[in-house]
Image (cartoon, rainbow, N blue to C red):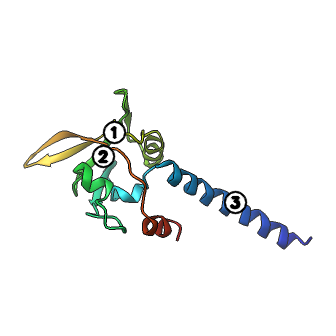
Amino acid sequence: MTKRLAVLIVLAACVLLYRGADFLQSLAGVPSAASFGKVDLRGGRMIVTVVPPVDLDGRPSFGAAMGLKVDDAVVAFERADGTRIPVTGLNSVGDAMRTLPRQGGGAMIVLRRDGNVEREARLPFLAGSRSGPITIARVWR
């Protein structure tokens, strides 16, 4: 076996392992981060820039169903037992989403501007539903 073929096999195995983890998470009902919307890091905060009203299958997106709005600053996640996970980066978002129970519970804590005042809003996670076939195919693209 040549060196190039060995490297190609190792890289292919890495891709399959990486995408396989995404597939298993989708089967387990872990929502995709994109189903909440798009974010931008501004001034050390994770600011929501887009909240899709529906997913690709025509169902309300997780973000829209929760009441997430553009310009909300995501500051923490609250588990079903009440413990808070502060958002310190995108890794903390992924860790929090993997621990969400499918039956709902917990919340996303955001700072929402109301005029000149920022108020903390608690957006509860709703009971999860499986993504439709178009959404799953799009994630696998």
**Outermost residue to the left:** 115
Q: Amino acid at mark 2?
A: Val
The image quadrant that residue 16 belongs to is bottom right
User: In the image, is 124 to the left or to the right of 140?
Assistant: left
Residue position for label 1:
76
Q: Marks 2 and 3, Cα distance to the nearest angstrom?
A: 32 Å
How many marks the image carries: the answer is: 3
Q: Residue at x 67, y 57 (%)?
A: 17
Q: Are marks 1 and 2 in contact (CB under 8 Å)?
A: yes
**Nearest to N terminus: mark 2 or mark 3:** 3
Residue 26 spot, x, y in % from top left: 50, 54
The 10 Å Cα crowd at callout 1, few under 14, some 14 to 19, many 20 or more, is: many
Residue 9 spot, x, y in % from top left: 79, 66
> Label 1's element?
strand
Q: Amino acid at mark 3?
A: Cys
For residue 74, the mark is 2
Above or below, 51 against 93 in this view is below
**Nearest to N terminus: mark 1 or mark 3:** 3
Q: Residue at x 27, y 60 (%)?
A: 51
> Label 2's element?
strand
> Label 3's element?
helix
Residue position for label 3:
14
Q: Residue at x 43, y 44 (%)?
A: 97
**Outermost residue to the right:** 1
Q: Are marks 1 and 3 in contact (CB under 8 Å)?
A: no
Residue 136 spot, x, y in % from top left: 48, 64
